[in-house]
């Protein structure tokens, strides 16, 4: 087919070179006049290097500039790293949103718990649905994952068929949700796939991922052997695991108590969608204290060490309704996300010091990943046979290893891209042809701020070297009125020689005023700047660090 100047391009705004914050664009048309669709709109979780920041979101300035040509937003599944930014960013785009029932309902339930969150009109689709969006036709293909109703997208355009896998694995017994639709994927391969944009998360692990059924069996055995209370923590979104814990509790004559708001929300949505049919109703936290120790299984949020989640509060003996004692058992039925190791470690150590036994996937089959290992990826490439491979959803190591795997499997064109790259998929030679505006937005309380703002950098400086605030008054002749007032935060109390830092700062202020002619002391801005430089220098000489310094001079 002759396409003239029309091109099919792929533009990742997040999810390449990092785990999380997944957001991708597909564009079709001539340069400057393309029509776009957006796939996913997720968050990443901020680390300790971003003080005061809760979440990271993709910078969508490029898409905002092209919002009139945005045909729609498609959500592959309801994990936060794929859907979590939608509430904050959708008002800037206001394009139609397409998602399965589970994702749409979970987003709506969460909205009721977030003050001021806007309602997002949702178009609910089913497995196998096809939706026309401008020059694109998008088909939703069922995939197994660690959350119900994960979809791959078969995206058709005049330039060819692209398979966007989303998050997936091959699991014949997923517990809740769909199995990966091998038959349909093979059919797409026979139709002819121009490009596959594929999950890279577990590419460095050989073989194939175990099944959720294996975890369910192990949980039943471990709970059956437990003598006292059992607490299980997992990702609240993992409905298969929630079901497995509830069934393991029932099989061993125990009641299952759900603890944590996120867990309650997911259970509500899963029940509405039929994924917990046949499961005995969950008990509330009020039942915890009245049940014998050998008749309870607590299902808790907080698998990633979140300080306000249920597990952390229980570990620190701060939960109002739930406590654990020596001889009880905690099962971490989850994988620690990179960056959360210290937070999880603190909780584990606290539990162990209290005499609580802790089991993890290092020694027992209590967790399996929702992402494909190399063996599963090899099968996917065998089914789909793309002419172009673009590895996504991973850090640099994962992307590179995925590219090597694709080449070894005979894929003719493998494109390694990064966030912001515009990748030409066809027609012509695939590769990076341009770069768009990209970056990160920080969720700071209820506000979104650009990563380029000085806010976080200033907070780091405050955390590193503290702050000195100084106020003083000068009269019309430039003489000091009263003593300077200052407040010190984050500095040591004394220098190496034992001199109080208050004296160091006071001497620096007085020396500046003595060294300035009276005429120049009448300029408040000049005095403020001179004192700021002198105090930072004096403290720096005595301490080896220069604090942030604020000076306010009042002329009276």
Image (cartoon, helix red, strand yellow):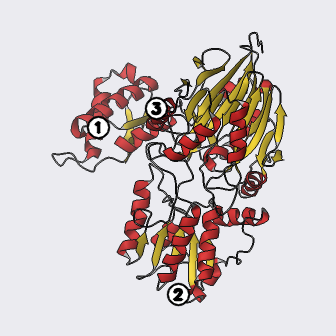
| Marks 2 and 3 close (CB-CB < 8 Å) | no
Dot placed on the residue nearer the N-terminal end, 2 or 3? 2
Q: Position of residue 170 (x, y in %)?
A: 60, 51
393 relative to 10 in the view: left or right: left
Q: Nearer the viewer, mark 3 or mark 1?
A: 3
Q: Nearer the viewer, mark 2 or mark 3?
A: 3
Which disc number belongs to residue 545?
A: 1
Q: For mark 2, what is the residue?
A: 294
- SS type, badge 3: helix
Relative to 116, is 233 above or below?
below
Q: Is residue 282 visible?
A: yes
Q: Say whether residue 554 is visible.
A: no
Taking the spot 60% from the left edge, 26% from the top edge, the residue there is 388
Residue 33 lies, with reference to residue 473, above or below; the image says above
Q: Residue at x 62, y 53 (%)?
A: 145
Q: Can you name the residue that lies furthest to the left here?
A: 497
Q: How far is disc 2 from disc 3 in space, using C-alphas?
A: 51 Å
User: Which of the marked residues, 3 or 1, is nearer the chain's N terminus?
Assistant: 3
Residue 292 image point, x, y percent: 55, 90
């Amino acid at each position: 087919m002759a396409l003239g100047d029309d091109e099919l391009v792929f533009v990742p705004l997040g999810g390449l070179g990092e785990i999380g914050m997944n957001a991708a664009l597909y564009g079709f048309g001539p340069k400057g006049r393309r029509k776009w669709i957006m796939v996913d709109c997720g968050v990443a979780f901020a680390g300790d290097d971003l003080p005061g920041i809760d979440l990271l979101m993709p910078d969508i300035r490029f898409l905002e500039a092209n919002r009139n040509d945005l045909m729609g937003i498609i959500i592959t599944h309801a994990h936060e790293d794929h859907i979590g930014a939608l509430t904050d960013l959708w008002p800037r785009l206001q394009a139609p949103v397409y998602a399965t029932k589970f994702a749409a309902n979970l987003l709506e339930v969460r909205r009721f718990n977030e003050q001021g969150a806007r309602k997002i009109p949702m178009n609910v689709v089913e497995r196998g649905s096809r939706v026309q969006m401008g020059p694109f036709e998008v088909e939703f293909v069922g995939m197994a994952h660690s959350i119900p109703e994960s979809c791959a997208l078969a995206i058709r355009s005049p330039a060819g068929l692209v398979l966007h896998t989303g998050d997936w694995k091959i699991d014949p017994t997923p517990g809740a949700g769909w199995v990966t639709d091998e038959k349909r994927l093979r059919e797409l391969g026979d139709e002819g796939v121009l490009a596959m944009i594929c999950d890279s998360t577990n590419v460095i692990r050989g073989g194939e991922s175990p099944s959720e059924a294996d975890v369910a069996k192990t949980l039943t055995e471990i709970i059956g052997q437990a003598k006292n209370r059992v607490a299980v923590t997992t990702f609240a979104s993992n409905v298969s695991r929630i079901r497995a814990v509830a069934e393991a509790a029932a099989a061993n004559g125990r009641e299952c108590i759900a603890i944590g708001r996120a867990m309650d929300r997911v259970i509500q949505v899963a029940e509405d969608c039929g994924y917990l049919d046949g499961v005995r109703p969950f008990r509330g936290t009020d039942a915890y204290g009245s049940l014998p120790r050998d008749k309870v299984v607590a299902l808790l949020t907080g698998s990633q060490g979140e300080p306000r989640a249920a597990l952390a509060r229980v570990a620190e003996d701060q939960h109002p309704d739930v406590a654990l004692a020596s001889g009880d058992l905690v099962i971490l039925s989850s994988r620690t996300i990179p960056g959360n190791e210290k937070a999880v470690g603190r909780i584990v150590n606290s539990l162990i010091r209290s005499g609580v036994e802790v089991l993890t996937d290092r020694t027992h089959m209590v967790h399996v990943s929702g992402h494909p290992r190399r063996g599963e990826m090899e099968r996917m490439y065998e089914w789909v046979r793309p002419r172009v491979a673009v590895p996504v959803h991973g850090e640099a190591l994962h992307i590179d290893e995925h590219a090597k795997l694709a080449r070894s499997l005979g894929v003719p064109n493998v494109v390694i891209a990064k966030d912001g790259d515009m990748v030409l998929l066809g027609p012509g030679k695939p590769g990076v042809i341009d770069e768009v505006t990209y970056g990160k937005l920080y969720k700071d309380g209820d506000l979104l701020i650009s990563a380029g703002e000085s806010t976080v950098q200033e907070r780091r400086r405050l955390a590193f070297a503290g702050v000195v605030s100084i106020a003083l008054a000068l009269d019309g002749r430039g003489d000091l009125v009263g003593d300077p007032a200052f407040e010190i935060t984050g500095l040591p109390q004394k220098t190496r020689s034992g001199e109080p830092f208050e004296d160091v700062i006071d001497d620096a202020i007085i020396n500046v005023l003595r060294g300035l002619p009276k005429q120049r002391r009448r300029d408040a801005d000049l005095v403020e700047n001179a004192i700021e430089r002198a105090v930072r220098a004096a403290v720096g000489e005595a301490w080896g660090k220069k604090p942030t310094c604020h000076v306010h001079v009042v002329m009276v």
